[in-house]
Structures are given as C-alpha cells and as structure tokens.
Image: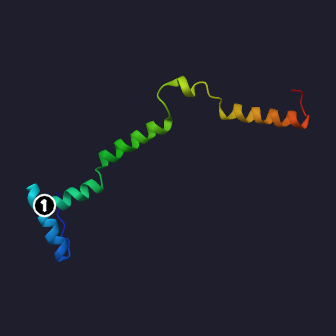
Amino acid sequence: MKSVTISLPDSVYDDAEAAAEPQGITLAQLVADLVEKHWPAAEDQAAAAKALETFFRGPGFPGISKNLPTREELYAERDDELARRRGDRDA
C-alpha cells in the first residue's frame, strides 16, 4: 500500500477526525475508504463494463427481439412505399 500526504484546512481536519472516531478507524483509513469508494478498483470497473455490454446487447431471451424486422427490412419497406406513392412500382 502506498502512502500520501495531504493538506486539509483545520476545520475540515477536525470534522474528519471527529467522523472517523465513532467508526473506530483512523483519519487515514477514513480518507482511504472515501477515495476507494469514489474510484473503484480495476476489477470492479471491468465487472461494470461487462454488465453494460450485456445490457446494451439487449434482452437475453429471443422472444421479443427475434420477431422485430432488421434495419435493412425496414428500409426496404420504406423504399417500396415511397416508390408506390410515386407510381414507380405496382403495389
């Protein structure tokens, strides 16, 4: 574990020390816990990224998305409708 020196205003130092005391931890541990909570470990970030990838891939059951038309099918329908309206093709 690395150590770091920080400077705090006297009032912040006193308040932080008072907050650490009832928890039975040192001021250094309180600051370390706050920093760790703000910047999760790389393993936690990797797990979060994997969860996001899973979410963005869509539902895990094919029942809903299986029956939806593809983008190409939607564009083909749109092109057919526009052509029909212009009279280029018979509908």
Q: How many marks?
A: 1
Q: Measured along the vertical axis of the image, is residue 66 above or below residue 21?
A: above
Identify whether 46 is placed above or below 89.
below
Residue at 73% x, 36% y: name it. 75
Q: Is residue 10 found left or right of 35 in the rendered image?
A: left
Look at 50% across and 34% down and name the residue there: 58
Q: Quadrant of residue 18?
A: bottom left
Q: Nearer the viewer, residue 36 or 15?
A: 15
Residue type at tag 1: Ala
- How packed mark 1 is, by other alpha carbons closer than 10 Å (few <14, some 14-19, many 20 or more), is some
Depicted 39 relative to depicted 61: above or below: below
91 relative to 13 in the view: left or right: right
Q: Is residue 17 above or below residue 75?
A: below
The quadrant of the image that shows the C terminus is top right
Identify the residue under disc 1.
Answer: 20
Residue at (43%, 42%) from the top-left corner? 52
- x 18%, y 75%: residue: 11
The quarter of the rendered structure image containing the N terminus is bottom left
Relative image position of residue 40 (x, y in whole percent): 29, 51
Residue 4 percent across, percent down from the top left: 19, 67
- Return the residue nearer the eye: 28 or 13: 13
- What colouring style does the render use? rainbow
| Res 35 quadrant in image | bottom left
Furthest toward the bottom, the residue is: 10
